[in-house]
């Protein structure tokens, strides 16, 4: 004869037993991963000595307040420009062919050398001398290139849709 | 090539097409990308988003609404097309703020995100404008955020024409259009049935599961005061959307690392919906349906979409319990199983193998049912094994076995959708098989399907029906036989079909002599005209499906009434063709499978009789034991056996028999007499209160397995979570117990159990886990090569000569307890809760919608007895007494009451009132044959059904989203005009 009953006695494990089992699990994992854990401890120790953990802990504790302040600082016109310019510059780099850039940069580096030399000279060249140097193949090559550059830049400016200007 | 196949060219490339397909469908069928947002394969063409513009012969047309014609040349890449698509997408983004990385819908499947990315949208042409409406968070499960809503109307289409609940519309007339519920009421107070269709089809985050909000993303839990400026910042500095998309895609990919997506099969009814469960740890983020699901596609009901909180309930059983004196004490598995093994062995030795009964679960898997009957038969040596189909569908199975030879649905949900006339007898699919009902409602609303409902109650389908007949309770057999006789008398029968494919016509015809219209009029209370109208509708339909459930099967003459339905279908030739057949709607997820896999006292798996020597020998050889020869006891006989002192012990799993068997007081008395009782469940059920040992089982989400749905479709479900606490999958428990009792079973996965069952039962010869992988499914019988059988009886019926049988049946007068019990008691399930509610009451949202059971009283009776909503009444039958609160409704008529069954409390439980009378053939209890008397205990009180229940809503039926109203707005400029007229003119549009 078994009457319907609802009473359930939760014997099973006590809180202490549950805790002991949890601790045993943690110790097992620690032992299995001792090398990684020891490295982590030394990192944490250094961070603590630096005072970095205090800062971090405060940051995490006050993450919402700090986040709001940070986002308010960032969400300003100057920052918008900085970020936008940064992204644009980054995109610009992505569009340049590396070989072309290399040629340009090696030319620039030579050009810089000569420019520095000329700055050291005491006397400035006369117009006649300048005119003469225009005739050298090197200068002409650069001039031609500059003309092409200007041409291309003009094309680029005209390509940008009107509503973006 | 057939006539209706041809080819078209898209961007110069050849594409095969079929007549009736749109350009978009042709492209999609070959995975060719034409952008689209509002189009959804399960919904069809909506024409609101305009992103699918293409050019055909120089004209801009929508690919979603333009039918492909032979030789058509389509261009989807030219500048004009791109301009049109860009314009469309810009209009969408005016309504939708892109903050993908911090959006909970950024999971790789956001249609708006993916389309904007595909179209390489770099900048917004029109500035985003917030709408002047706050978000609607009133509903417990989902929210609507108008600011993010692109007004594509997918949700409206899904609500109006797929679910066909007709709650959502877009109000195009107001200045800023938005989606509204009913007549613009808060969602929670509307007619919304919480099926989730709208949320599932929303192509962005306007409609979201609340369980996803702040949970799905890494950054989405950010508080509003930080999120706002962050979105502003992103928009300020964005050099173009490309960079935003790159970051949001990275974030979406990261989400996949912690959100697990697992396919499962729903356990809330026999329809067999499948979908993915998204989990983060043990937390269920959402249910995500898929077009690939073979039965339901993207459809779900309130329980399937939202009702899974029970899995993490702190009321779950997590440790075995052993009765000690007046209390249960927690025990280890070892102690519990050892005790069970000892007790069962002892009782078997003392009283014989047949002194123990085994009750299986229609909620558990095929593999678990297979293993349980193997345990009962091969280890314990008895055929005393049954499942709860005994409480519902056994009579339907018996009626079909007699007439057509297979006890299952004749076809699939697609046949029901394709039928010209659906006849529903004693079933309430809109609440008990919600997704199946959607297919009927859709065909009825959009495709001219006729609907006939025979029911005491004006349930939802009865309300929508072309003809609703309300016969006297328990008179269906007369009604069906009279209609069949009239059809034969008119010469409307399918003569060729009967001659070629059916035996026994003449004998059957003469058995109908007594069922004249006059006799039927007297016994059913229906007029001759109504009966003739029914016969005419059946005669005029080229295809008829008959659906039935508990309204037929829970009567004393249940098997015979089921037979009468099948007879009617045979006489009119409605078997073996698309859109025809008999469909007993299985109530539980695996009622069909539990029977299929042998938890029945007279059958091995696959309906092979235990008395058949050859069959028995096959199993004896495979299992290496001698098997009992005679059929065992069914559920009903087991309870009788306990009272007679013959049955001493019971092992039951996954079944709350104390509440769901009829005449509970009698059943409970029986349980008290048992010497030993094992109950295995996920919760401490009412039945468990009588147990000696209670074992904690794991629900479907915590194990692998297969179910068979009402269509005979076998589908796999996969483990989503680990079993909670020390609970275990039922099959593992059986194996451990069996091995403790000397078996040497070594199943490591349910797939191995299925392999064994498939090797032994002919019906399942070609069933395998490999063939059932993912969304794949098989409908039995399955041949060894894997060929399955969606539609039965195409060429032959399942008898040796291939011919069906007309079987003469007699009417059994329903049970009447006596004059003093003056009100008829009807009863059944409801949409929001599963049965007694053990699982569904663990969901706060479901309980918010339906907190209590109630009794429905007709307005006439309420006037007579001076009752109003909330009054408390006592109902008394010869078997017991309950007390419940009243809802007055015209769903019921006259002296007929309807009591819902969603309670675990004795004082409200309908089966305290029902009797032990049963179907004369299958012993299914006659739950639907009871009269009661009613006394008023309190004339008023709080209504048992809150005002936030859909039953009080106000539907707004319409077809689709009424896009024409959008096009008529003054501020709408058709894109084709804009692009043609002015290559880049600014426009001022609604969206």
Image (cartoon, helix red, strand yellow):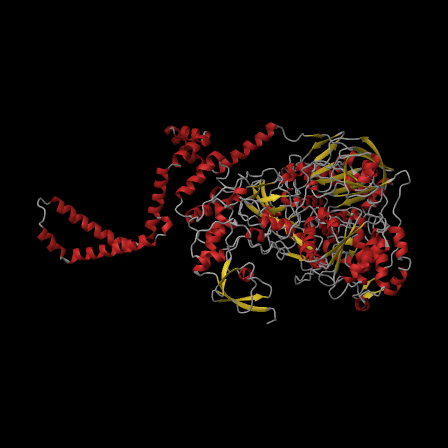
> Relative to residue B687, is residue B287 drawn left or right?
left
Q: Report the front residue among B647 and B170.
A: B170
> Relative to residue B89, is residue B726 drawn left or right?
right
**In the displayed structure, would residue B6 be above or below residue B883?**
below
| Quarter of the rendering containing residue B761 | bottom right
Tell me if I can see residue B608 in this picture: yes
Q: Report the front residue among B102 and A46.
A: B102
* Number of residue marks: 0
Q: Report the front residue among B494 and B909.
A: B494
Q: Report the front residue among A39 and B580.
A: B580
Tell me if I can see residue B317 in this picture: no
Q: Position of residue B378 (x, y in %)?
A: 75, 50
Q: Position of residue B289 (x, y in %)?
A: 60, 49
**In the displayed structure, would residue B117 be above or below residue B192?**
below
- Considering every residue shown, the one lying at the far front of the view is B970
Q: Position of residue B235 (x, y in %)?
A: 42, 43
The quadrant in which the N terminus of chain B is found is bottom right
Q: Position of residue B398 (x, y in %)?
A: 81, 54
| Quarter of the rendering containing residue B413 | bottom right
């Amino acid at each position: 004869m078994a009457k319907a009953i609802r009473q359930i006695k939760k014997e099973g494990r006590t809180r202490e037993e549950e805790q002991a089992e949890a601790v045993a699990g943690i110790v097992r994992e620690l032992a299995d991963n001792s090398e990684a854990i020891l490295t982590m401890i030394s990192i944490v120790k250094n961070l603590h000595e630096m005072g970095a953990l205090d800062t971090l802990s405060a940051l995490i504790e006050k993450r919402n307040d700090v986040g709001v302040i940070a986002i308010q600082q960032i969400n300003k016109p100057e920052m918008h420009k900085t970020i936008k310019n940064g992204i644009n510059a980054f995109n610009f780099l992505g569009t340049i062919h590396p070989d072309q850039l290399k040629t340009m940069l090696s030319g620039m580096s030579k050009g810089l050398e000569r420019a520095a030399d000329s700055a050291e000279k005491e006397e400035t060249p006369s117009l006649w001398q300048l005119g003469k140097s225009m005739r050298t193949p090197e200068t002409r090559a650069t001039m031609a290139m500059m003309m092409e550059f200007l041409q291309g830049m003009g094309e680029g400016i005209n390509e940008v849709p009107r509503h973006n200007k | 090539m057939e006539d209706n196949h041809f080819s078209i060219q898209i961007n110069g490339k050849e594409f095969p097409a079929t007549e009736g397909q749109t350009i978009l469908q042709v492209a999609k069928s070959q995975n060719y990308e034409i952008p689209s947002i509002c189009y959804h394969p399960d919904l069809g063409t909506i024409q609101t988003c305009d992103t699918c513009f293409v050019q055909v012969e120089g004209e801009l047309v929508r690919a979603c609404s333009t039918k492909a014609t032979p030789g058509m040349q389509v261009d989807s890449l030219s500048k004009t097309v791109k301009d049109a698509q860009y314009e469309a997408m810009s209009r969408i983004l005016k309504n939708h703020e892109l903050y993908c990385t911090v959006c909970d819908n950024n999971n790789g499947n956001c249609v708006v995100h993916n389309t904007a990315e595909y179209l390489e949208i770099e900048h917004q042409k029109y500035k985003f404008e917030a709408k002047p409406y706050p978000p609607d968070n009133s509903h417990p499960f989902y929210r609507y955020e108008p600011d993010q809503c692109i007004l594509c109307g997918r949700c409206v289409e899904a609500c109006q024409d797929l679910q066909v609940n007709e709650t959502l519309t877009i109000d195009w007339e107001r200045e800023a259009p938005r989606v509204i519920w009913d007549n613009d009421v808060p969602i929670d107070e509307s007619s919304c049935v919480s099926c989730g269709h709208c949320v599932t089809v929303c192509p962005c985050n306007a409609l979201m599961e609340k369980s996803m909000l702040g949970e799905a993303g890494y950054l989405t839990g950010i508080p509003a005061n930080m999120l706002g400026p962050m979105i502003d910042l992103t928009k300020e500095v964005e050099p173009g959307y490309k960079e935003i998309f790159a970051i949001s895609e990275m974030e979406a990919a990261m989400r996949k690392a912690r959100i697990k997506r697992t396919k499962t099969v729903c356990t809330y009814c026999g329809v067999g919906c499948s979908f993915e469960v998204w989990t983060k740890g043990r937390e269920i983020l959402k249910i995500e349906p898929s077009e690939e699901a073979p039965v339901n596609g993207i459809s779900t009901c309130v329980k399937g979409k939202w009702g899974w909180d029970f899995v993490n309930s702190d009321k779950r059983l997590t440790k075995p319990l052993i009765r000690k004196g007046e209390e249960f004490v927690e025990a280890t598995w070892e102690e519990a199983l050892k005790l069970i093994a000892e007790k069962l062995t002892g009782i078997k030795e003392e009283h014989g193998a047949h002194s123990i009964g085994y009750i299986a679960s229609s909620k558990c898997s095929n593999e678990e049912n297979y293993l349980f009957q193997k345990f009962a038969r091969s280890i314990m040596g008895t055929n005393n094994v049954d499942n709860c189909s005994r409480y519902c569908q056994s009579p339907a199975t018996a009626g079909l076995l007699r007439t057509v030879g297979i006890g299952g649905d004749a076809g699939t949900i697609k046949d029901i959708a394709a039928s010209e006339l659906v006849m529903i007898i004693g079933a309430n699919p809109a609440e008990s098989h919600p997704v199946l009902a959607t297919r009927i409602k859709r065909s009825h609303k959009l495709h001219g399907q006729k609907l006939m409902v025979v029911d005491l109650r004006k349930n939802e389908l009865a309300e929508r029906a072309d003809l609703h007949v309300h016969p006297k309770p328990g008179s269906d057999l007369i009604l069906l036989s009279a209609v069949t006789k009239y059809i034969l008398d008119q010469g409307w029968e399918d003569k060729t079909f009967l001659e070629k494919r059916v035996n026994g016509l003449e004998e059957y015809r003469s058995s109908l002599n007594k069922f004249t219209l006059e006799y039927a009029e007297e016994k059913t209370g229906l007029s001759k005209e109504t009966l003739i109208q029914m016969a005419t509708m059946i005669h005029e339909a080229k295809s008829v499906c008959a659906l039935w459930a508990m309204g037929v099967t829970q009567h004393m003459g249940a098997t015979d009434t089921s037979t009468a339905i099948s007879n009617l279908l045979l006489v009119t030739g409605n078997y073996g063709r698309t859109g025809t057949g008999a469909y007993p709607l299985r109530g539980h997820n695996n009622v069909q499978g539990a029977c299929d896999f042998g938890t029945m006292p007279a059958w091995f798996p696959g309906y092979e009789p235990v008395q058949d020597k050859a069959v028995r020998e096959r199993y004896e050889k495979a299992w290496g034991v001698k098997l009992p020869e005679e059929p065992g006891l069914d559920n009903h006989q087991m309870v009788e056996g306990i009272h007679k002192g013959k049955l001493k012990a019971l092992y039951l799993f996954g079944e709350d028999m104390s509440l769901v068997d009829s005449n509970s007081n009698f059943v409970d008395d029986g349980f008290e007499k048992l010497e030993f009782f094992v109950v295995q469940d996920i919760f401490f059920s009412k039945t468990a209160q009588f147990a000696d040992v209670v074992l904690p089982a794991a629900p479907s989400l915590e194990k692998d397995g297969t179910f068979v749905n009402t269509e005979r479709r076998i589908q796999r479900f996969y483990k989503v979570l680990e079993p909670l606490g020390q609970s275990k999958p039922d099959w593992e428990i059986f194996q451990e117990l069996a091995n403790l009792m000397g078996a040497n079973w070594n199943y490591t996965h349910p797939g191995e159990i299925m392999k064994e069952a498939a090797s032994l039962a002919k019906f399942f010869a070609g069933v395998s886990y490999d063939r059932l992988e993912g969304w794949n499914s098989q409908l039995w019988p399955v041949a060894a090569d894997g060929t399955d059988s969606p539609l039965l009886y195409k060429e032959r019926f399942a008898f040796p000569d291939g011919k069906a049988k007309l079987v003469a049946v007699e009417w059994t007068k329903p049970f009447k307890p006596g004059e003093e019990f003056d009100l008829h008691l009807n009863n059944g399930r409801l949409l929001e809760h599963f049965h007694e509610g053990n699982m569904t009451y663990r969901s706060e949202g479901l309980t918010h919608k339906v907190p209590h059971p109630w009794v429905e009283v007709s307005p006439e009776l309420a006037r007579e007895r001076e009752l109003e909503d909330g009054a408390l009444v006592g109902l008394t039958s010869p078997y017991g007494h309950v007390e419940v609160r009243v809802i007055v409704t015209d769903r019921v008529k006259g002296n007929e009451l309807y009591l819902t069954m969603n309670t675990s409390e004795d004082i409200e439980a309908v089966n305290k009132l029902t009797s032990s009378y049963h179907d004369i053939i299958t012993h299914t209890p006659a739950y639907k044959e009871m009269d009661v008397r009613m006394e008023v205990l309190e004339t008023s009180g709080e209504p048992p059904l809150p005002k936030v229940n859909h039953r009080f809503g106000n539907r707004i039926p319409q077809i689709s989203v009424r896009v024409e109203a959008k096009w008529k707005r003054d501020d709408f400029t058709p894109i084709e005009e804009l692009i043609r007229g002015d290559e880049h003119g600014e426009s001022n549009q609604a969206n």
